[in-house]
Image (spheres, coloured by chain):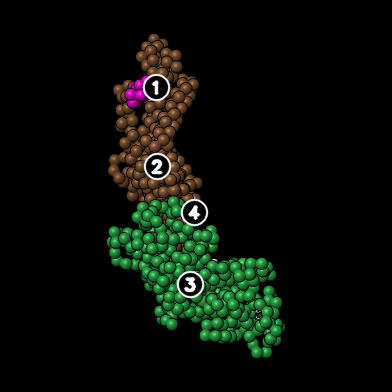
């Protein structure tokens, strides 16, 4: 195995461990406990509950046993929804969230790149100005405002799309649009500026001198180089989309993980807070790793960790 | 001799915020089959614009061919459609640019960049294209070409990259090869090798070459004919011998004085004083007048006629006029 990748994997685990540790102690430093909201629980019951969930153990003991169970991918039971384990909650919520997140990413990337390319090719033309105005709107309007606007326009004033729940492709359109508009705008602007720069490069002139068609020049020669900065940004955008799903799921009443995550914090459902955080952190860390890999595939000059001969 | 390319009274302008830059102002020359024509002149005199106009590659807007004809085997390239022009680029007329470090796409293997050129113009498969590319890489002197064609530009040295660029330009067996400062970015020893390669390839393929350079040293090695360009005009044309041993235009003489010469290594190098005129509003008369030690009253008012000295040697200078003082001829 290439030593770079070994180092990367080790770094990934260290990062994850830091996140777990920080979350664990921060979470326990928030005042309150899982049973504080249930007014009627008397002291004896509370004591029993605490000892049942080992909440009366010293913090470092709890921390140790949490890490131990984590190694076996066991995220523990939910305190508030005692019928379920955290693994089960993630198993129910995550597929929906993932569907929302992935579609958002696909829409943002595909539409963003197309918009950016068209704007670059029509540099300083009407289409360029239109696309960039749209992009500025997309960047400056927060996704929850966008969601409300979309619902008002396309579900109330002009009822083409249903809102709430996640039962058919038609239900998915508005949440995906609301969540994708920001990242799409960022990608469009970045693609445009980097495309304009690439189109002025000598090798594009060389490609034209070979008699290649404009389509070949754009898609084979320019786009690949122009997408490098976009790929770099993809990790950060994915993180944004991930946190965005919490808000969007709430607005559109989508039964994803966002619901559990937000509720768990309000209710101090410690295992669920930990479980969702660890799970999402792991996903993000893996995403960033994949972005690095993609970088090396797109640009042959970047040979990760390999020495040039 | 058969003419493959005839440029007639070519004018090219760039419209900018400051006004029109008249970069090329009435350039006329022919290119004969199998010859190497060098176009020399100081930087900014319009060499690149002339060559890119032939390929119709000047950025447009702002650039525009405002007047003149470019005849390739009798066909006027200034008014063929863009689609037609694409069929000519790379297949009939090819171009090599100055900097091999930036002329190749960093994200595609060099083999692919050569192959796509052939496949654009010839109806052949990838395997056949690969074979042709391999042969061409061997022809331009790239060792272990089969391995190297899978590599990327950054894995090659400057000289090797320029060989790749040359292979790319020649792979469709074009009739005309335009090389715009092909050796300027390279070390002196590599320069000599590349020039050698041009000569070699011309012998093998019979391609006609337009070699553009600001360096008379480069020209001395390979050119059959030389056109000297100044401020958007060709001011003197002649065979290599005529230009080197019997230069008539004061600008040509100035250029010759400013290059190191092997036969007179203790001679002083004299750069030409002053700078070329502003091309926004070029002078009505001889553009060299402000820098010319022989300038006469008429020079700055009226552009000189073309004087034919031999079948190929011609010059635009008032000193050739019979009314001009004759003291100049003795000096060089
Ligand atoms: N895209 C452009 N816009 C405006 N002016 C240009 C452009 N390209 C070239 N020119 C002008 O045309 C003139 C000739 O340039 P060029 O042909 O590149 O000179 P060189 O002889 O060094 O190759 C220069 O004065 C330059 O400023
Ligand atoms: S025309 Fe006059 S100014 Fe121009 S080069 Fe000849 S002598 Fe000099
Ligand atoms: Mg030039």
What type of secondary structure mainly makes up the magenta span? loop
Residue B125 in the image: state x and y as whole percent.
Answer: 28, 61
Looking at marks 4 and 2 on the same chain, the residue that comes earlier in the sequence is marked by 4
Mark 1 and mark 3: Cα distance apart in space: 73 Å
Q: In the image, is residue B291 part of the stretch drawn in magenta?
A: no
Instruction: Say which of marks 2 and 3 sits in front.
Output: 3
Quarter of image, res A23: top left
Looking at marks 1 and 2 on the same chain, the residue that comes earlier in the sequence is marked by 1
Q: Are marks 4 and 2 in contact (CB under 8 Å)?
A: no
Whether label 1 lies within 8 Å of ligand 1 gets the answer no
- The brown-coloured chain is labelled A
Label 4 crowd (10 A; few <14 / some 14-19 / many >=20): some
Q: Residue at x 35, y 64 (%)?
A: B118
Residue that label 1 marks? A67
Q: Is residue B217 above or below residue B109?
A: below
Whether label 4 lies within 8 Å of ligand 1 gets the answer no
Label 1 crowd (10 A; few <14 / some 14-19 / many >=20): some
Residue that label 2 marks? A293
Q: Quadrant of ligand 2?
A: bottom right
- Residue toward you, B175 or A269: B175
- The green-coloured chain is labelled B
Instruction: Say which of marks 3 and 4 sits in front.
Output: 3
Residue that label 3 marks? B210
Instruction: Say which of marks 1 and 2 sits in front.
Output: 2
Say whether mark 4 and mark 3 are on the same chain.
Answer: no
Quarter of image, res B243: bottom right
């Amino acid at each position: 195995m290439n030593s770079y990748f070994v180092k990367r994997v080790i770094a990934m685990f260290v990062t994850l461990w830091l996140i777990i540790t920080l979350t664990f102690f921060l979470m326990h430093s928030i005042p309150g406990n899982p049973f504080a909201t249930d007014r009627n629980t008397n002291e004896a019951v509370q004591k029993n509950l605490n000892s049942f969930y080992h909440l009366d153990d010293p913090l470092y003991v709890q921390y140790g046993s949490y890490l131990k169970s984590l190694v076996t991918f066991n995220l523990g039971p939910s305190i508030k929804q005692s019928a379920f384990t955290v693994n089960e909650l993630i198993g129910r919520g995550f597929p929906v969230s993932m569907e929302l997140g992935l579609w958002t990413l696909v829409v943002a990337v595909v539409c963003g790149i197309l918009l950016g390319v068209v704007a670059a090719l029509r540099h300083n033309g009407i289409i360029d100005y239109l696309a960039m105005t749209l992009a500025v709107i997309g960047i400056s309007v927060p996704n929850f405002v966008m969601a409300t606007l979309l619902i008002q326009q396309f579900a109330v004033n002009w009822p083409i799309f249903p809102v709430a729940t996640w039962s058919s492709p038609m239900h998915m359109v508005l949440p995906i649009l609301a969540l994708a508009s920001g990242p799409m705008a960022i990608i469009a602007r970045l693609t445009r500026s980097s495309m304009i720069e690439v189109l002025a490069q000598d090798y594009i002139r060389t490609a034209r001198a070979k008699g290649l068609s404009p389509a070949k020049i754009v898609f084979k020669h320019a786009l690949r180089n122009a997408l490098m900065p976009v790929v770099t940004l993809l990790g950060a955008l994915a993180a944004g989309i991930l946190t965005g799903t919490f808000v969007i799921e709430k607005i559109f009443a989508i039964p994803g993980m966002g619901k559990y995550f937000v509720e768990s914090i309000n209710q101090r459902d410690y295992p669920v807070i930990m479980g969702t955080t660890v799970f999402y952190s792991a996903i993000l860390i893996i995403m960033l790793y994949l972005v690095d890999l993609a970088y090396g595939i797109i640009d042959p000059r970047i040979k990760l960790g390999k020495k040039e001969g | 001799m058969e003419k493959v390319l005839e440029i007639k009274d070519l004018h090219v302008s760039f419209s900018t915020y400051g006004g029109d830059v008249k970069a090329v102002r009435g350039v006329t020359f022919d290119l004969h089959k199998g010859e190497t024509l060098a176009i020399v002149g100081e930087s900014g005199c319009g060499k690149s614009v002339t060559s890119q106009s032939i390929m119709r590659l000047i950025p447009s807007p702002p650039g525009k061919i405002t007047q003149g004809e470019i005849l390739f085997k009798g066909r006027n390239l200034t008014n063929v459609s863009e689609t037609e022009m694409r069929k000519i680029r790379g297949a009939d007329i090819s171009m090599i640019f100055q900097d091999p470090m930036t002329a190749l796409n960093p994200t595609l293997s060099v083999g692919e960049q050569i192959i796509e050129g052939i496949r654009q113009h010839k109806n052949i498969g990838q395997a056949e294209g690969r074979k042709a590319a391999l042969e061409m890489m061997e022809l331009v002197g790239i060792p272990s070409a089969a391995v190297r064609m899978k590599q990327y530009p950054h894995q090659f040295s400057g000289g090797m990259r320029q060989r790749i660029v040359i292979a790319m330009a020649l792979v469709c067996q074009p009739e005309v090869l335009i090389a715009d400062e092909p050796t300027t970015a390279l070390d002196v020893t590599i320069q000599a090798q590349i020039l050698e390669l041009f000569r070699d390839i011309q012998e093998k393929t019979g391609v006609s070459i337009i070699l553009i350079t600001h360096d008379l040293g480069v020209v001395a090695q390979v050119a059959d004919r030389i056109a000297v360009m100044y401020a958007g005009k060709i001011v003197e044309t002649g065979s290599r011998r005529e230009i080197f041993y019997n230069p008539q235009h004061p600008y040509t003489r100035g250029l010759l004085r400013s290059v190191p010469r092997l036969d007179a290594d203790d001679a002083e190098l004299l750069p030409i004083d002053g700078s070329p005129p502003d091309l926004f509003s070029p002078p009505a008369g001889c553009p060299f007048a402000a820098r010319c030690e022989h300038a006469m009253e008429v020079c700055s008012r009226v552009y000189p006629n073309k004087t034919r000295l031999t079948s190929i040697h011609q010059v635009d200078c008032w000193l050739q006029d019979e009314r001009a003082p004759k003291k100049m001829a003795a000096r060089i």
